[in-house]
Image (cartoon, rainbow, N blue to C red):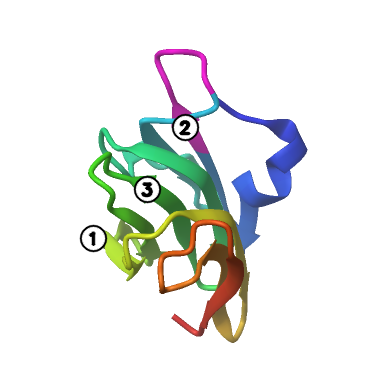
């Protein structure tokens, strides 16, 4: 699953390196059940890495800050838990999974940006009181 209309979020540069992120699905839907990345380190491609497991994922994307990469995605574990997850690549390896937001409400339209000051993310979610029709923009910077 690689949608070229979203390619600005799926392929990025950071310093002399490049990274690509994609999702795999078995049912030809727009929902991925695992996401993968691969990095070109200015001389060759590093091994393909699975970033997420078997949960429903969407809005997966990758950004660079000049030194490394950050991958982010929305994840629904099927039990009412909706999270925003990130993993960082610095130097030679990917970090373990970090949860940026886990209030359990639905999340939509994640956008990830990276620059020399770090990473910023913005997304829409329901209000904390649980009103499913209210969409409020949330953001996190410099993580």
Q: Is residue 56 above or below residue 80?
A: above
Q: Residue at x 31, y 43 (%)?
A: 52
For the residues carrying marks 2 and 3, which lies nearer the camera in this image? Answer: 3
Q: Main secondary structure of the magenta part?
A: loop
Tell me if mark 3 has few (under 14), some (14-19) or many (20+) residues whose alpha carbon lies within 10 angstroms of its own. many
Asked if residue 66 can be seen in this view, the reply is no
Q: Secondary structure at mark 3?
A: strand
Q: Secondary structure at mark 2?
A: strand
On the rendered image, what quadrant is the N terminus found in?
A: top right
Residue 23, numbered label: 2
**What residue sits right under mark 3 in the picture?**
75
Magenta residues? 22-29
Q: Image height check: is 94 above or below 22?
A: below
Q: State the residue at coordinates (61%, 72%).
A: 137
Quarter placement of the C terminus = bottom left
Q: Earlier in the sequence, mark 2 or mark 1?
A: 2
**Residue drawn at (55%, 54%) of the image:** 108
Indicate yes or no whether the magenta region holds residue 23. yes
């Amino acid at each position: 699953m690689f949608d070229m209309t979203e390619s600005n979020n799926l392929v990025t540069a950071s310093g002399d390196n490049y990274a690509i992120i994609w999702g795999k699905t078995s049912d030809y839907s727009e929902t991925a059940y695992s996401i993968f990345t691969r990095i070109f380190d200015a001389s060759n491609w590093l091994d393909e890495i699975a970033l997420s497991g078997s949960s429903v994922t969407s809005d997966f994307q990758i950004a660079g800050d000049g030194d490394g990469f950050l991958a982010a995605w929305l994840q629904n574990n099927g039990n009412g838990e909706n999270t925003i997850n990130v993993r960082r690549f610095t130097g030679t390896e990917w970090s373990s999974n970090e949860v940026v937001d886990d209030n359990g409400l639905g999340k939509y339209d994640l956008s990830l940006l990276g620059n020399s000051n770090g990473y910023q993310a913005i997304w829409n979610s329901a209000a904390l009181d649980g009103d499913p029709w209210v969409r409020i923009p949330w953001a996190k910077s410099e993580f």
